Image (cartoon, rainbow, N blue to C red):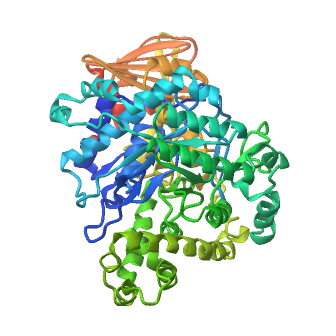
Amino acid sequence: MTELQPYPFGLLVERIFDELDNADAIFSLPRKKFFLGDPGRDLSISFHRQRASSPLGPASGPQTQMAQNIVLSWLGGCRIIEFKTVQILDELKIPRPCIDMATVGYNIEWSQELKLEQSLHEYVKGMMLIEILKASGRLDLSPGFGDVIYDMSVGYDLKGIKSKPVQSFIKGIIDARQTIDHYKKEIPERFSHFRLIDFPPSISNSLTLSTFHGCPPDEIEQIVDYLLNHNQLNCVIKLNPTLLGEEQVNHLLHQQLGYGDIKVPTTAFEGDATWSQTKAFIERLQTTAEGLGLGFGIKVCNTLIVENHRDFFPASEKVMYLSGAPLHVLAVNLVEKIRHHFKDRIPISFSAGIDHINFSKSVALGLVPVTTCSDLLKTGGYSRTSRYFSRLQKEMKQLEVDDIDEFIIKAFGKGKQALKQCCPEAVDPRLAACLKALGGGQSLRLAAGEALLSNWVSEAKLLNTHSYAIETTSDPRYNAGNNSKPPHKVGSSLELFDCLTCDKCIPVCPNDANIILAIPSVALPVQHLTWKGGSWLVEEHEPIQLKMKHQIGNFTDFCNECGNCDVFCPEDDGPYLIKPRFFSSLENFNRYSGTDGFLILRSEISTIIHGRFNSIDYKVVVSDGKVIYSGPTFSINFQCDDPLQTVKGEAEGSVDLTYYEIMTAIRQAVLDTGKINYISALANQQR
């Protein structure tokens, strides 16, 4: 099984601008799917007293663990980016596959798959790439749409968080100057002017604590108190949906939504913090934060632990974690419960089943940020966020509002009721002005003034939350019946070459690991050579006919074998396992000796391609028109343009030239077509 490997920073910089020039895309995301702001509307929000240009963020997860993922999230309009959770145990062996988005969404992966220092470097690289893009002038960013906030995420116990490695990570994010200086030197010479950018020395001053996977309830308060006092960080506690209680969770899942197959183990409720415990430590921690002049809030919510009743994950996994549509309903009901008790005193961020339909509704609840994960793992990947903003813009236009506060007041039609709760006196002179503005499409901010507007928004949040909890709980789109149909499968199995070429596997990979190979429709000869009687005899077989417009490949450094592309591929067996897989180094090629694939190396005088087929290694060296082709039982050489007539060498038995033809087609597709890919950049760097 391959593991994630960071990519050289300088090559990421080159990739961005070369791809913009040649394909009008960045990391396979077309420019037309970027969201770069709305010149006519202010979509900004405040998070810990800092401005972010939009309320959308990627949740801590697959979209925020590598530099290119972070850039893709930003290009999609995300402006509060929650880095993937890190912990002291940074060499976990997570079973594969680990993400099942066939219906509602399940996973068994739950924290960063890189080591702590690698994570720090990926997060710094992601920030720097975004700053480079902003400074480049190559994107039509709307004025004010460049403000981005980064949020750390850590777990899962006090001992681990106080440990030297985790504290070094936190300090390295708070003061990233040393790492920034390191990567400034890696910016390629042709982009040397970007070294002069004033990169933010502190990437983040906020942190979200993840409280699941065994985080002891009695330690939650101690952890946040430590982070507030010791690290001086604005803090958010990410809560579990089990706070609704076993009875309500099961009622919503089974009776209300119809997910009879989803079973939440009783132990999930027994091991988590109770509602009474949670209310108490929220009050105390908010007081502590206020005393320190820091921000404090809560996030709803973590995924929900459920029994593994499906056959997608390894049988060794007895539990898995629920996301998607049913979690959205649970989470909204939890927000309602929290606001019923705390009113609008506690800022709430949100992550649970967000998609293009409910994003604007969640924004109208005053949740900051509203983060998404599972939806971006579906067909289209990061490009799906463009629909989030299209719908939000459409609704804001219909309501004649220009900013998020005014949208909150008007979105659920509760503006008048909320206003009267702010202005109980009928003679209040502001009441008439605000009612006039509310009905006439005028500025609510100007009519109310900042103080009243703030109270008005708070009252609207509470009313909207109550309405939306009722609405979403009874909305059929969240029912099991509307979330039980898996992606269509055609019944055929993938092979190394040719498939339906639907290209769905490319955007559904959060790491951009699947790539297009520009191999044209061609017949690859199938020939066997045998040394007999002092000469080479050729045995011809039916050629391999490549019929499709291009082929699909996989870059192993970015592939953690999560299985998501297999879910959405119409054919069986998984592109990440069957399609040509590419390694970045000889070390990795040898390290994963049980994985078939290819490695392309280049020097001033030769090109070398290593290939592994059915666990057997082959090698082709091309230099000055000559080829050396070798395998376990042979080593032959010949001229590129006339192999059969110029072949020399030794062999035990016959030599199958098919592998040479395949390796040649792959070498040419990667190096000679001018198409931008991660493999050619690495190979060319070696020259």
The extreme right residue here reads 266
Where is residue 445 drawn, in percent x and y? 33, 75
The residue under the point 59% across, 56% down is 570
In the rendered picture of this protein, how many numbered marks are placed on residues?
Answer: 0
Location of residue 121 by image quarter? top left
Q: Quick check: 651 above or below 281?
A: above
Q: Quick check: 626 above or below 581?
A: above
Location of residue 384 by image quarter? bottom left
Q: Is residue 134 left or right of residue 654?
A: left
Q: Is residue 191 left or right of residue 410?
A: left
Does residue 281 show up? yes
Q: Quick check: 382 above or below 533?
A: below
From the viewer's side, name the closer residue of 133 and 88: 88
Where is residue 202 drawn, in percent x and y? 34, 35
From the viewer's side, name the closer residue of 174 and 532: 174
From the viewer's side, name the closer residue of 291 and 660: 291
Q: Quick check: 1 above or below 137?
A: above
In the picture, the quarter occupied by the C terminus is top left
From the viewer's side, name the closer residue of 170 and 131: 170
Does residue 155 show up? no
Q: Is residue 642 left or right of residue 462?
A: left
In the picture, the quarter occupied by the N terminus is top right
Where is residue 227 drawn, in percent x and y? 53, 35
Where is residue 590 drawn, in percent x and y? 53, 18
The residue under the point 60% across, 41% down is 562
The residue under the point 29% across, 57% down is 145
